Amino acid sequence: MILTNLFGKGFGGSVLVGIAKVDSGKEYHHAFKKRVGSSYESRITYIVDEENSNFEKAMDHLTNLSPYRMYGAGISANIPGKHYSAIRKAANNFHWGSLSAAPIIWTLDSADSMDIYLTKGARSIMTNDPALAVDRIRNAGLHLTPVGEFPSRAISQQSYKYPGNTCDCKWSRPKGSWDLCVISTPAPRFYACQCFSVGTGCEGSVVECIDPKAYCEWPDTSHESCRNAGPQSNCGGY
């Protein structure tokens, strides 16, 4: 139907082909890809958008399916739910080239929720209030995708699943103390680095950001980034 009734009639855009769950929908994805072939490969992007608690399964499926792939998370606007972790992971996978586009979140109808998910890395919003979404996207300093710009080909087959302890801290003695820490290697995007003293040195651990709007999208080695890991973080070395 898409080949004949859409592309066959001159449609010049791109198409998202989505499934909710990998186990129940993967055969549809594979059958659709086989039917379409390579003629419109760059204009068809495959997405999984309801594996909210199993990001790794979604990424394994998408990585083996097509170089044009996206991830989404969400639930009806009438049902509360949070999908921060999955959105952060998808945003990092896009940043490192494992996804074709930044993640989509659905369905948001409040400005506060839109603001929070934009700070987590979402860049597409499904909503019943498009004008509000446009306003919040612009308020975040972001731009709408130009007409004719399609999701890009993923350049990495490696799925980034969880940051682990990929930040580090070192001790500092600005006041003559041996147990004051500073960040030496910052946390990955959308996370914070918590410093703690170990013997006469310091180590770091990746944790959730206390404030998603402050030093969370692009964490660094500053005092502010260290404090964004929470009151347990040893930031006395600054």
Image (cartoon, grey):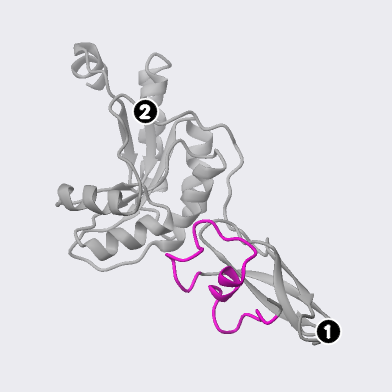
Identify the residue position indicated by label 1 in the image.
Answer: 199
Q: What segment is highlighted magenta in the picture?
A: 209-236
Residue at position x 35%, y 58% from top? 117
Q: Is residue 192 left or right of residue 33?
A: right
User: Residue 220: x, y in percent?
Assistant: 61, 61
Residue 208 appears left or right of 138: right
Taking 14 as reference, is 55 above or below it?
below
Contact check, label 1 and label 2, Cβ < 8 Å = no
Q: In the rendered structure, does residue 156 fall within the stretch colored magenta?
A: no
| Residue density around tag 1, few if under 14, some if 14–19, many if 20 or more, within 10 Å | few
In the picture as drawn, the residue positioned furthest to the front comes out as: 175
User: Toward which corner of the image does residue 152 lie, by quadrant?
Assistant: top left
Residue 61 point in image, percent of width and height? 49, 41
> Mark 2 Cα within 10 Å, few/some/many (few <14, many 20+)?
some
| SS under mark 2 | loop
What predominant SS class does the magenta segment belong to? loop
* Amino acid on which disc 2 is placed: Phe
The residue under the point 32% across, 35% down is: 145
- Badge number at residue 124: none
Q: Position of residue 59 (x, y in %)?
A: 50, 45
- How many marks overall? 2
Q: Which residue is mark 2?
A: 150
